[in-house]
């Protein structure tokens, strides 16, 4: 493989998190009040790329990594004292700014999804914590996990990265962080699992110009008010019936109807009122189970037909792969502390690791030959393995010294999928600009 010309790996990472900006925000957050032995930029990169040095992430392990990579001998307290509430706030602010910058125009939704600005996947994952954090992060399963945090993520399929995040105690309802739906959903398509099911939420998305697909709850039984597809011959009438009654004995491959739902709006000035809306329900028959998979959406029929609605919803699995990537490779579920600010700092560091990883992945895909792909979990394993070397390269770059090897060569040789014929879940749905 010939040597790659152009932007270096360390340049991609340091342009994403410039040293001057890191120092400036560290001063604003109270992390850097005077010049100390622990350099704040090297400290940042140790948190972001130092996870791959050992199988378990510990504060002692991060301190040893800092010492080895900077050739600096420091006292334990000098390193541990860097973990303060200000540090957690500093890293959280960097995450917020980075999420605003990672959106790229180099990719677009393709095929039948090209009419949407983005495809957003919404879900959450639970992170177990030390029992002494129960007051700040109350868990649901107190018989074995008294403290747990819930990381809520809105993932952009177009950018293959988080677009929005929220951190709450595990007991927080999944819908709570996204109750205030605004203009950011306009022209986007959002996919939900049953934990987010709520007609009020769907209505707010619809009112703000967004689109959604969700599985229909088993106890939902709205009234059918219209059919979106006409069947030849003497088809069984469904209009005017409750949905479950209409499905009983139905022998259609696809059911595509409009239904009327009644739900309670949120309390406003001490009063709660009911509202009525009309949504689309798509049912696709499963020969294996003999039952219909039911979806509720507001997407017009001329934009996605019934089969396309079901096929698009299967892309929701991509966010599960994102959580697996963060937990299996970036140590998201390893929080070795009973102090809230330390846990929050390490959690935001894991998210920054993900952002850095996907920035490199995006740059690497630009250099990859046509017809080649990089599976997400394969990439995560490669990034995990080379992270120690990347840390050396980045620290050399920020200290204006020169790294000896070009990391692009290793990344390109290891990350590309060797199975060229294996289909991808996103094939034909996301286009990459070269």
Image (cartoon, rainbow, N blue to C red):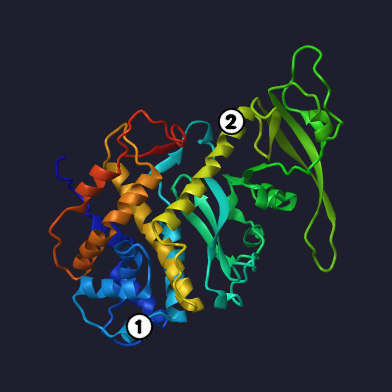
Q: Earlier in the sequence, mark 2 or mark 1?
A: 1
- For the C terminus, the image quarter is top left
Q: Which numbered dot is residue 303?
A: none
- Residue at the spot x=39%, y=59% of the render? 330
Q: What residue does disc 1 label?
A: 32
- Residue at the spot x=57%, y=51% of the render? 122
Q: What residue does disc 2 label?
A: 308
Above or below, comparing residue 380 to residue 146 in the picture? above
- Tag 1 secondary structure: loop
Question: As drawn, is 291 to the left or to the right of 422?
Answer: right
What is the residue that sits farthest to the top in this orientation? 233
- Residue 171: quarter of image: bottom right
Whether residue 117 is visible to the viewer of this picture, yes or no, is: no
Question: As drawn, is 108 to the left or to the right of 240?
Answer: left
Measured as percent of width and height from the top left, residue 342 is found at 45, 76
Measured as percent of width and height from the top left, residue 314 is found at 56, 38
């Amino acid at each position: 493989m010939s040597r790659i010309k152009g932007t270096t790996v360390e340049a991609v990472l340091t342009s994403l998190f410039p040293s001057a900006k890191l120092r400036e925000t560290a001063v604003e957050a109270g992390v850097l009040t005077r010049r100390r032995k622990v350099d704040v930029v090297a400290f940042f990169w140790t948190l972001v790329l130092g996870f791959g040095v050992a199988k378990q992430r510990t504060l002692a392990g991060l301190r040893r990594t800092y010492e080895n990579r900077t050739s600096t001998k420091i006292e334990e307290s000098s390193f541990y004292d860097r973990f303060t509430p200000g540090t957690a706030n500093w890293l959280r602010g960097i995450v917020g700014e980075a999420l605003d910058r990672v959106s790229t125009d180099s990719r677009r939704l393709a095929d039948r999804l090209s009419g949407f600005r983005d495809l957003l996947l919404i879900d959450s994952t639970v992170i177990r914590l030390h029992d002494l954090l129960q007051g700040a992060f109350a868990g649901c399963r107190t018989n074995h996990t008294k403290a747990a945090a819930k990381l809520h993520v809105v993932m952009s399929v177009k950018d293959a990265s988080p677009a929005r995040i929220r951190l709450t105690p595990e007991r927080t309802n999944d819908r709570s962080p996204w109750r205030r739906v605004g203009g950011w959903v306009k022209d986007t398509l959002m996919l939900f699992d049953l934990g987010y099911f709520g007609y009020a939420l769907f209505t707010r998305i619809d009112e703000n110009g967004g689109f959604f697909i969700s599985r229909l709850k088993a106890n939902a039984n709205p009234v059918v008010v219209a059919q979106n597809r006409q069947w030849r011959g003497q088809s069984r009438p469904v209009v005017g019936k409750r949905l479950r009654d209409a499905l009983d004995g139905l022998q259609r491959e696809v059911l595509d109807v409009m239904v009327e739902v009644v739900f309670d709006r949120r309390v406003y000035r001490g009063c709660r009122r009911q509202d009525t809306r009309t949504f689309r329900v798509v049912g696709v028959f499963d020969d294996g189970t003999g039952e219909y998979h039911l979806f509720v959406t507001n997407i017009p029929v001329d934009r996605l037909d019934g089969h396309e609605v079901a096929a698009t919803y299967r892309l929701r699995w991509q966010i599960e792969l994102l959580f697996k990537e963060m937990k299996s490779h970036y140590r998201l579920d390893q929080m070795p502390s009973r102090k809230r600010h330390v846990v929050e700092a390490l959690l935001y560091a894991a998210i920054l690791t993900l952002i850095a990883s996907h920035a490199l992945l995006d740059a690497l895909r630009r250099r990859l030959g046509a017809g080649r792909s990089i599976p997400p979990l394969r990439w995560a394993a490669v990034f995990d393995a080379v992270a120690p070397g990347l840390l050396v390269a980045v620290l050399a770059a920020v200290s204006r010294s020169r790294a000896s090897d070009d990391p692009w060569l290793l990344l390109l040789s290891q990350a590309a999928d060797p199975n060229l014929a294996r289909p991808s879940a996103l094939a034909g749905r996301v286009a990459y600009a070269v």
